[in-house]
Amino acid sequence: MKHLLSAADLSKDQVLELLDTAEQMHDVQHRDVKKLPALRGRTVVNLFFEDSTRTRSSFEIAGKWLSADVINVSAKGSSVSKGESLRDTVMTVASMGVDGLIIRHHASGAPAQVARWVNAAIVNAGDGTHEHPTQALLDAYTMRRRLGDLEGKHVAIVGDLTHSRVVRSNLLLLRTLGAQITLVAPPTLMPSGISDWAAAEGFSITGELDPVLPTIDVAMMLRVQKERMSGGYFPTPREYTIGYGLTRDRLRKLPEHAVICHPGPMNRGLEIAADAADEARSAILDQVSAGVAVRMSVLYHLLGGNA
Ligand code: CP
């Protein structure tokens, strides 16, 4: 594995190896002595053209706990704000002698383009509405810790599917792991062409959340991405919550063993009620914690392990 650009690039064996390594990294994460020497002498740059709390910080922690030198470059505060192009920016950063580039960009496909320009290992940390493969890995890791093997487990992915890069990476990765998937969204937030893809891959699609809830092992609630809806959004927030929010009433329909996930950041009170986000079935903070272990695993395999 030279880069991690898409969840589609990973075979089942590679996914399982990454998750198994993440289990070992989790043990490191939860011990007093956290640093491993695996990436000593390696340099990793976090190059973020879009805002992030979880992904950027967990990649920084992951790199540091593997003893890499980690540098953060964000569009705000860099020469990108003076109009420097993506190509000139990455060529400039790469010229300094970088082993790994972690890239978040608003344009779908930007990390794949960067991988053609530079020799460093490239990790897609979220590109437009396209993909977020390390999010799918940490989601699978979190589900597996709670539910065991994901083969045949029923995962409902609910909400703003049109603007979500998380859903595409999860569909690809969960399919690889043999999970059963149901997509739930209002018609206005269902991506065009999804029906054909779903038919080809065996995903279910529905506009009704309530009948699905009692049948699922995982409720993955997606953020309504208001910042990507310049013309306003429909349904209205109130209608959205009534139809698709994980409300206190809907919690009663979820099986006891079910796991509640959300990639964050959450719109509390819109797609997920505070009662749902904070109850025992919620794995949302586990997902954040898993982000460090999974990203340690990815960096280890790309830069220091069995690349
Ligand atoms: N889930 C996720 O990508 O969160 P951030 O935008 O905070 O990185």
Image (spheres, rainbow, N blue to C red):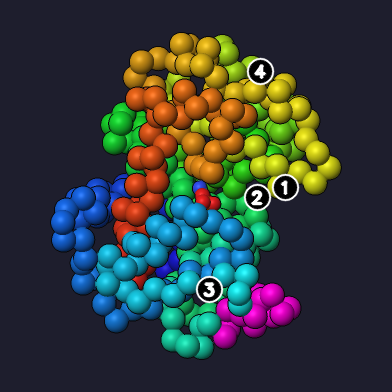
Name the dominant secondary structure of the magenta segment.
Answer: helix
Where is residue 114? Give x, y as percent: 58, 72
Residues rendered magenta in the picture:
79-92
- Cα separation, mark 2 vs mark 4, equals 25 Å
- Cα separation, mark 4 vs mark 1, equals 22 Å
Residue 36, which numbered label?
Answer: none
Instruction: Report the residue at 65% width, 37% height from top.
Output: 224
Are dots 2 and 1 in contact, CB under 8 Å? yes
Instruction: Report the residue at 73% width, 78% height from top.
Output: 83
Q: Which residue is mark 4?
A: 242
Q: Is tag 1's residue or tag 3's residue first in the polypeptide sequence?
A: 3
Q: Is tag 2's residue or tag 4's residue first in the polypeptide sequence?
A: 2
Amino acid type at image mark 4: Ile
- Cα separation, mark 3 vs mark 2, equals 22 Å
Left or right for 194, reference 232: left
Q: Which residue is mark 2?
A: 129
